Structures are given as C-alpha cells and as structure tokens.
Amino acid sequence: MKAVVTKPSDSTGHPTKNQSTPPRSVDWVAIERAYTTTLIALRDIGKEHGVAHSAIVKRAQRDAWKRPEQPKRVTRKLAKLEPRKRKFVEAFLEEPNATRAAMKAGWGGTKGSASTAGCEALKKPEVREAIQAERDRLSEKLAITRERVLAEYARIAFFDMRRAYNEDGALKRPHELDDDAAAAIAAFETVEIAGGQDAAPLAVRKVKWADKRAALDSIMKAQGWNKADVGTAENPLVIRGFTMTERAVRMSRALQANPELVAALASLVAKEEP
C-alpha cells in the first residue's frame, strides 16, 4: 500500500508556495547600547544583530548617538610617568604654563607653591623628555615639520599682492586664487550694494592680508637671525636700548623659549620669600 503525501493548499485547493521564515526583529535598543558604550566596530555590531552597518550609521545620525571617545594615544615616555607627573605634562602641553599645570596636577595649594612645584617638575629629565616626545608625536601625526612651517611663513612674507588681481584691477574670486595667494589672505568678504531701479547690485570684495611683518619676524626667529633682540642661550635677556614695553615683550619671549630659565627665576623668588 502506497503512502499518500498531501501538500498544503490554500482555500481554493491550489498548493501554496513554501512559507518563508518571518523576518528577525531588530533590537535597536541593544544596538544603541553597543554603539554608545563600546568601541566595537559597526560592521561587527551589524553582524551580531543582523542589520547592515549603513543602517546603523543612519539611525545614529537620526537619533544623535555618540560613540565613546577613543583612548588617547601617548608615547611610552609619557605612559611611564607616575600619574601626577603625567597629568602635569598633559596640562603643560595644553597650556605651557608650569604654575597652572602644577595646580591641575594637584601640586601645591597656593599659587606660590604650585609655581615652585611646576618649576621643579620642569627640571626633571623624564618630564622634559615626555613633553618633547609628545610634541614630536603630534608634529608627526599632523605632518608638521620645520620646513613646512617656514614654507607657509615664506608664502606670507614674500607674496606679491598683484597676483591676487586680474588685469583689469578686479580682485580675483576665491576659487581663482592660486595656493600662494590663498595662503596670504587672512579674510575675504563680499558685500553686495543694491543698485538703482534698473541696475544690478554692485559686489564689493574686501580682503585682509596676513601680517607680512609678523611672518618675517617668525622666520628670523626660527632661523636665529634676530638674537640681538631676544638674546642668546648664554645671555637670553639682552634688552639694552628698548623701551619698557619692548623690554617686557622681549623678556616674555625669552622666558617662554627657556623653561629652564623660568625654573631658575622661580627658585630664586621662592628663596627670597619669607
């Protein structure tokens, strides 16, 4: 006797097509949690929940999800420092002021004690090496080199403004400027002035040039050609023949360029205080 196999049929008696598995519901709550609290790659989150990573990106943009911050990469020299020294270095890199950096690191309850602690910290070889290593790391990351910086200063210092104008004397539009001209312009503004009844509006373009003198001074300083103004390593406070304002400016520059000198002066002041 043969077994009879019956196929499922609809109400009309015709065989029905194979029923597909119902689609899996997307758990957007879990996806949001993974997106906002972990550093798991979006593709991996999508695979786990059965959704394309592009859909996660769209949902994140729509609902303003925020990814957690990536752990800050630091050099080995900074990582090896004890917590307070490391915090001091990080604060000093943000703002090269030893007193404020020391206060942020938790050294000294008063400004005077923080100043002494900050100067003492800058004397430590491991701290200075960590500061320099972090500066080098950032320069490498951003491709900042001495040559590149000087090249940008040179663009400003030696730019011929005639290159920014057409033959008829009209100022070129921003997209018409070459790289050197664009680098020499600090600000560009277009103002439209309403014309008469039948006249078209008049466009007036204003341009602010970058400071050529400041660029030249920066080149001179970088190349060590203005030592008479800011002093030398042996005598960093050469300020003869200057007004009080000029002396203050030169002294400020010299102190900023010589943290060891700041530390020495702070130590002297601390010793003289009662």
Image: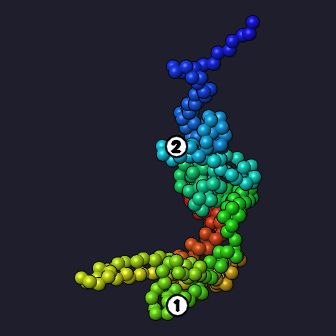
Q: Which residue is at a point 64% across and 15% down the rendered structure image?
A: 6
Residue type marked 2: Arg
Q: Which residue is at a point 61% across and 44% down the rendered structure image?
A: 53
Q: Is residue 164 above or below residue 138?
A: below
Residue type marked 1: Arg
**Disc 2 target residue:** 59
In the image as oriented, which residue stretches furthest toward the left?
Answer: 197
Q: Secondary structure at mark 1?
A: helix
Mark 1: few, some, or many residues within 10 Å (few <14, many ≥20)?
A: few
Instruction: Please tell me in which quadrant of the rendered image residue 94 appears.
Output: bottom right
Residue 28 location in percent, x, y?
54, 35
**Disc 1 target residue:** 162
In the image as oriented, which residue stretches furthest toward the front?
Answer: 1
Residue 226 location in percent, x, y?
64, 84
Mark yes or no: residue 68 visible: no
Question: Nearest the camera: 15 or 205?
Answer: 15
Q: Which residue is at a point 46% across and 92% down the rendered structure image?
A: 169
Mark yes or no: residue 160 visible: yes
Instruction: Please tell me in which quadrant of the rendered image residue 235 appears.
Output: bottom right
Instruction: Please tell me in which quadrant of the rendered image residue 122 appears.
Output: bottom right
Q: Which mark is residue 84?
A: none
The C terminus lies in which quarter of the figure? bottom right
Residue 43 location in percent, x, y?
65, 43
Q: Is residue 182 above or below residue 102?
A: below
Mark 2 and mark 1 in contact (Cβ < 8 Å)? no
Q: Secondary structure at mark 2?
A: helix
* Mark 1 or mark 2, whichever is nearer to me: 2
Residue 228 location in percent, x, y?
64, 85
Q: Earlier in the sequence, mark 1 or mark 2?
A: 2
In the image as oriented, which residue stretches furthest toward the top?
Answer: 1
Q: Which residue is at a point 51% across and 47% down the rendered structure image?
A: 61
